[in-house]
Image (tube, rainbow, N blue to C red):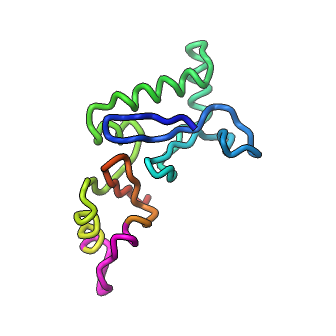
């Protein structure tokens, strides 16, 4: 996996090479996965789009991915980075307490408020550096 250091934290992107028997490479033929700072799935780039762009500009697909990595690394705000990654999100914070409060207000009814561990392990929470992002569940 390629490590991409942004101003906000590290994200990861699979390399172009595909081998379903080697998870160090791209594990799905039709997409290049992007991962958050915890190496949890975040989003993907369609392989068809990457290969089409490579063909259009007469470069390798890996060169196209390197261009995306450079663009992601130079995002000027966390919101810009999420837009570049095509991430729809509900909430962004650098405070775990604010994240727990958000989940307690937005996602709980008569239950006890969620614990920090429950919130941090929620499948809709991703982390980029110090930022916690609650993605839309669509």
Assign the C terminus to one quadrant of the image.
bottom left
Task: Tell which residue pokes out farthest to the right in this image.
Answer: 21
In the rendered structure, the answer to whether residue 102 lies left or right of residue 14 reads left
Q: Nearer the viewer, residue 16 or 50?
A: 16
Residue 43 place in picture, x, y as percent: 49, 46
Magenta segment boundaries in residue numbering: 105-119
**Which x, y percent locates residue 126?**
40, 54
**Residue 57 drawn above or below residue 113:** above
Let me know if residue 50 is in the magenta part: no
Residue 26 is situated, as x and y percent measured from the top left of the image, at 65, 40
Where 45 falls versus 127 (above or below)?
Answer: above
Secondary structure mostly seen in magenta is loop
Q: Residue at x 37, y 49 (%)?
A: 88
Up-down relation of residue 48 to residue 107 (above or below): above
Residue 55 in picture, x, y percent from top left: 62, 18
In the displayed image of the protein, which residue is found farthest to the top? 58
Q: Is residue 129 above or below residue 53?
A: below
* 102 relative position to 58: left or right: left
Which residue does the image show at 28% across and 53% down from the upper left? 92
Instruction: Point out the image quarter for the N terminus.
Output: top right
């Amino acid at each position: 996996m390629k490590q991409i250091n942004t101003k906000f934290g590290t994200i990861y992107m699979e390399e172009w090479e595909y081998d379903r028997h080697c998870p160090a490479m791209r594990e799905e033929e039709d997409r290049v996965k992007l991962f958050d700072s915890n190496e949890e799935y975040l989003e993907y780039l369609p392989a068809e789009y990457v290969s089409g762009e490579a063909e259009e500009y007469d470069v390798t697909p890996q060169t196209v991915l390197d261009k995306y990595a450079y663009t992601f690394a130079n995002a000027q705000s966390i919101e810009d980075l999420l837009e570049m990654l095509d991430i729809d999100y509900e909430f962004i914070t650098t405070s775990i307490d604010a994240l727990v409060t958000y989940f307690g207000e937005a996602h709980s009814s008569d239950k006890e408020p969620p614990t920090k561990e429950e919130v941090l392990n929620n499948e809709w929470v991703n982390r980029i550096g110090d930022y916690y992002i609650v993605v839309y569940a669509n």
